Amino acid sequence: MATTAQIDTPPPETPLHTPSGPSTGRLGDRVFLGLSRGSGVLLLVVMAAIAGFLTYRASIAISKDQGNFFTTFDWLPSQTPPVFGIAVLLVGTVISSVIAMVIAVPVAVGIALFISHYAPRRLATTLAYVVDLLAAVPSIIYGIWGALILVPYLGGLNVWLDQYFGWTYIFDQTQPGVSRNMLTVGILLAIMILPIVTSVSREVFLQVPRMNEEAALALGATRWEVIRLSVLPFGRSGVISASMLGLGRALGETMAVATVLSPSYVMSLHLLDPGGGTFAQNIAAKFDEANPLGRDALIASGLVLFVLTLLVNGAARLIIARRKEYSGANA
């Protein structure tokens, strides 16, 4: 008669200490819990206060606007009757930010990969220090540099783009002159957000498990294949987060744009023609000279920028949440 051997499995070990809640009841834990919870509540209160203030002042301005706030091209809140709209500002903000992202993100990822995986240690340390230093440069410095250096030297690029790519409409230059246009603003914003995207991406790439890279190399992968198969998938969510941080700065940049751009309220998709405007630049340029209704109108445009920023960050969080399971970040 066959018998079945009984294998006694040891009971699971009981942890010596299992926290039953967010606090152990000690005074230090209770104080820290209260401070942490208070900080979180304070943040929500500040956000709600900002949103409430912007909404209240914006409702006053929009109720007196005789035009369509979202489609009107003019900005004349001081005339009788007042007419103003954000169409030009919204288009200018989005176009300049898109140009900045298209230029900055690939370059930033390339610099981050070079620092983290290709450069010798001394060179990588020096480059990382320079990149971090560029992130701390004030916006007005970038604006002055852009107005004195970037604007004059981009004239040749504008002529070249108009000559060879004018058939694309967006590079068709109908008003030759000083290059104080949306392309120059986009390039300047790209330079400004480059250090932010590079720094965050570099830190993410450095967190790739060494075992993943060594396993790929052991299977005969080249350095580029290791980066393509191990590094980039792991750091994808981090690069998206870094890009959103850069996009947030590009959307809200004020002084640099105001210094470089020759603003106007003419809607034009010709990137090489002077003119256009952004929310932040318009607020900075008009706030001092505006009457009470004009200031409420500027606050209304600030509310649109506030909502736009929240939507961009919310979309980024959704993308990161959906891609996290594929990135290997939880491995």
Image (cartoon, helix red, strand yellow):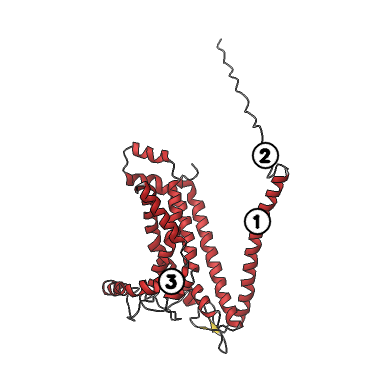
Task: Identify the residue at the far left of this view.
Answer: 164
Q: How many marks?
A: 3
**Which disc is residue 39 wearing?**
1
The type of residue carrying mark 1 is Ser
Q: Which residue is mark 3?
A: 143
Q: Which residue is mark 2?
A: 19
Residue 202 picture location, percent across and down: 43, 51
The kind of secondary structure element at disc 1 is helix
Q: Give the foreground label among 3 and 2.
A: 3
At 68% across and 49% down in the image, what residue appears?
33
The kind of secondary structure element at disc 2 is loop
Left or right of 255, for residue 164: left
Task: Identify the residue at the far bottom of this view.
Answer: 80
Q: CA distance from mark 3 to mark 2?
A: 53 Å
Residue 177 picture location, percent across and down: 33, 80
Residue 14 picture location, percent across and down: 65, 30
